[in-house]
Image (spheres, grey):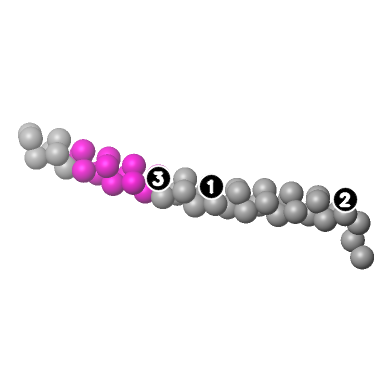
């Protein structure tokens, strides 16, 4: 049987891993949106020349 202290430590580690995974997911989504905006800006600049 696990000690209550061990359960707390495991819960904290699990929570941190979930938080890191969740934040990385949104960082990737934001990065993709930034790339799309950059591509649109490049197209606009090329079309004005």
Q: Alpha-carbon distance for marks 3 and 1?
A: 11 Å
Residue 5 is marked as: 2
Segment colored magenta? 30-42
Q: Secondary structure at mark 2?
A: helix
Residue 23 is marked as: 1
Q: Secondary structure at mark 3?
A: helix
Q: Residues within 10 Å of mark 1 (few under 14, many from 20)?
A: few
Q: Alpha-carbon distance for marks 2 and 1?
A: 27 Å
Residue 38 in the image, given as x and y percentages of width and height: 27, 40
Residue displayed at 15% across by 35% down? 45
- Mark 3 and mark 1 lie on one chain; the one further toward the N terminus is 1
Quarter of the image with the N terminus is bottom right
Quarter of the image with the C terminus is top left
Residue 30 is marked as: 3
Specify whether 21 is left or right of 5: left
Residue displayed at 60% across by 49% down? 19
Residue displayed at 49% across by 52% down? 25
Report the number of discs: 3
Q: Secondary structure at mark 1?
A: helix
């Amino acid at each position: 049987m696990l000690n209550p202290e061990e359960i707390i430590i495991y819960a904290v580690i699990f929570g941190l891993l979930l938080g890191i995974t969740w934040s990385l997911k949104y960082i990737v989504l934001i990065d993709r949106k930034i790339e799309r905006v950059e591509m649109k800006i490049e197209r606009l600049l090329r079309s004005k020349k």
